[in-house]
Amino acid sequence: MNGKHWTTKDIPDLKGKTVIVTGGNSGLGFEAVKAFVSKGAIVIMTCRSTIKGEIARENIKNSIPKAEIILMELDLANLSSIQNFSDKFKQSHTKLDILVNNAGIMMVPYALTVDGFEKQIGTNHLGHFALTGLLLDILKKTPGSRVVNVSSLAHKSGVMDFDNFMYNNGNGYKPMKAYGRSKLCNLLFTYELQHFFETNQIDCKAIAAHPGVSDTNLFSHSIPKWVMVLLRPFTLFFIQPASMGALPELRAATDPMAKGGEFYGPNSHSEMKGFPTVVQSNQASHRIDDGKKLWQLSEKLTSVQFK
């Protein structure tokens, strides 16, 4: 496979594989679901709104009639919803080949999840941490399984502060600051998860990916629509379509040569766009002590233990 021009054509046959994609009804997740089912995988498309999910499912089925898509409700900002989803999934499935922790929110105003977590940390990191932990037993039973965590270039602006991890009462909260921290958490979690797999001799890989700068609805809170309309002729130079933005997570999930602990992103324009290849995350994402602290804190906050 040519790393410079890896596309969905390079995805191997996925018949018999079971895949979960969080936030699969729009943006990167939608494109990922389409790619997985086009190669024969059974995909569980999770979303907060089953109504929107059904519309997305039918859109894919219209172009890929044989697509096997199972729609399941999942709100990553609600631990009870995550537990319910996990229970229902394990009642009806005996294997999980690929878990793509794709869903996320970006630069939203300060708010709390149902469980009292700052919303971006709660959704982007803690929700996926809990989901992965609750599905760990079935991942362990599936030979060669993978967990793909979708981070962002914004991880480079993230700063860990365990004394004020979730901006208590909005203290010091800035939308971009919190988003960057949540995306840094995605990477710290990925690398610590890979260490956990290796230490416990679990046949599973933890791999991270980022989409560069992609045209998705995540920008809805950060940039007014009228501004995007005015800037669109200029943004075309550095924003790529969601179908391209999804390629790094798809490669991380399916490339037979991908290794645990790798990070995939676009290969040009300072990783803002291009074809997926192995890229390097910043030094902060490799701080082992921070990874361990985050893991311990995440277990405590979610009450989900990795065993």
Image (cartoon, rainbow, N blue to C red):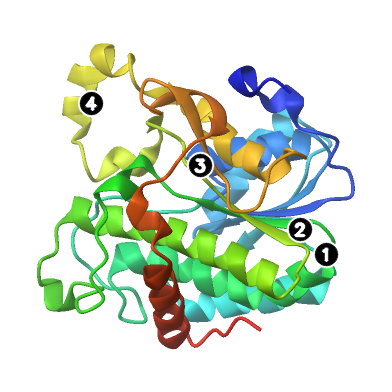
Horizontal and vertical percent position of residue 26:
50, 42
Label 3: state its secondary structure.
Answer: loop
Which residue is at a point 40% across and 84% down the rendered structure image?
301
Q: Earlier in the sequence, mark 4 or mark 3?
A: 3
Q: Are marks 3 and 1 in contact (CB under 8 Å)?
A: no
Q: Are marks 1 and 2 in contact (CB under 8 Å)?
A: yes
Q: Are marks 1 and 4 in contact (CB under 8 Å)?
A: no
Q: Earlier in the sequence, mark 3 or mark 1?
A: 3
3D distance between C-alphas at marks 3 and 2:
24 Å
Which residue is at a point 32% across and 62% down the rendered structure image?
120
The three-letter code of the residue at mark 4 reads: Met
Q: Nearer the viewer, residue 13 or 105?
A: 13
Q: Are marks 4 and 3 in contact (CB under 8 Å)?
A: no
Q: Which residue is mark 2?
A: 145
Q: Which residue is mark 3?
A: 26
Q: Earlier in the sequence, mark 1 or mark 4?
A: 1
Q: Nearer the viewer, residue 75 or 143?
A: 143
Label 1: state its secondary structure.
Answer: loop
Horizontal and vertical percent position of residue 111:
23, 68
